[in-house]
């Protein structure tokens, strides 16, 4: 995964994209990110836990939304491969304002798609090597990937009100 140099010195980088593989089960507890991030699960099985007691299964084809500053935990029971796209909190606000965010739940299902993981990886590589004059184009492509993930939703959470309680 790649963070753009504009994010140097910031926690985790504000502009991140790419693919990750973790070759063992693992757990991330009580985590919050200042960005809006989406993880597309390509391989692996786990559980997303919100701090209000909600539990959501993660499987190939799932998308996990990391809402800015909302604490959560993730437990992976298997090795996992996933794509990550993360942008500053303003991306979350823009997607909500334009009606692109249509999910009440932090996890939704878009279907397993081998090409989709490749898009995360290609955008991460572009983020790493493009000169600064192309940076805005890459950010727009990252935002468009987020928008597309929302519109691919095949779960029952689509078209329900968005709940963004910060804990």
Image: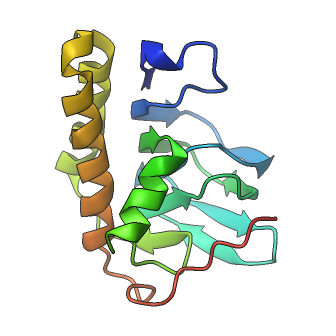
Question: Which corner quadrant of the image does residue 2 belong to?
Answer: top left
Identified at 51% across, 88% down, the residue is 161
Q: Which is more toward the observer, 25 or 141? A: 141
- For residue 94, side relative to residue 79 (left or right): left
Q: Quadrant of the C terminus?
A: bottom right
In the rendered view, would you say 20 is above or below 82?
A: above
Q: Position of residue 43 (x, y in %)?
A: 42, 50
Question: Which corner quadrant of the image does residue 15 belong to?
Answer: top left
Q: Position of residue 87 (x, y in %)?
A: 45, 41
In the rendered view, would you say 146 is above or below 6?
A: below
Question: Which corner quadrant of the image does residue 51 belong to?
Answer: bottom right
- For residue 125, side relative to residue 23 (left or right): left
Q: Which is more toward the observer, 28 or 45? A: 28
Identified at 44% across, 31% down, the residue is 16
Residue 48 seen in render: yes
Q: Which is more toward the observer, 50 or 46? A: 50
- For residue 159, side relative to residue 51 (left or right): left
Q: How does the figure colour the protein chain or chains?
A: rainbow
Q: Position of residue 110 (x, y in %)?
A: 31, 69
- For residue 130, side relative to residue 28 (left or right): left
Q: Quadrant of the N terminus?
A: top left
Q: Position of residue 100 (x, y in %)?
A: 32, 70
Identified at 62% across, 74% down, the residue is 56
Residue 60 seen in render: no
């Amino acid at each position: 995964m790649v963070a753009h140099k504009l994010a140097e010195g910031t926690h985790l980088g504000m502009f991140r994209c790419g693919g990750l593989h973790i070759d063992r089960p693992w757990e991330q507890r009580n985590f919050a990110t200042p960005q809006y991030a989406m993880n597309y699960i390509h391989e692996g099985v786990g559980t997303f836990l919100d701090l209000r007691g909600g539990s959501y299964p993660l499987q190939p084809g799932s998308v996990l939304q990391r809402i800015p500053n909302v604490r959560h935990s993730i437990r992976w029971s298997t090795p996992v491969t996933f794509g990550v796209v993360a942008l500053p909190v303003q991306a979350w606000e823009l997607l909500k304002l334009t009606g692109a965010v249509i999910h009440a739940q932090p996890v939704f299902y878009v279907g397993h798609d081998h090409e989709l993981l490749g898009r995360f990886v290609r955008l991460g590589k572009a983020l790493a090597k493009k000169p600064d004059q192309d940076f805005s184009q890459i950010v727009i492509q990252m935002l468009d990937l987020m928008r597309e993930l929302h519109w691919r939703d095949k779960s029952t959470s689509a078209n329900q009100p968005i709940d963004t309680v910060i804990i």
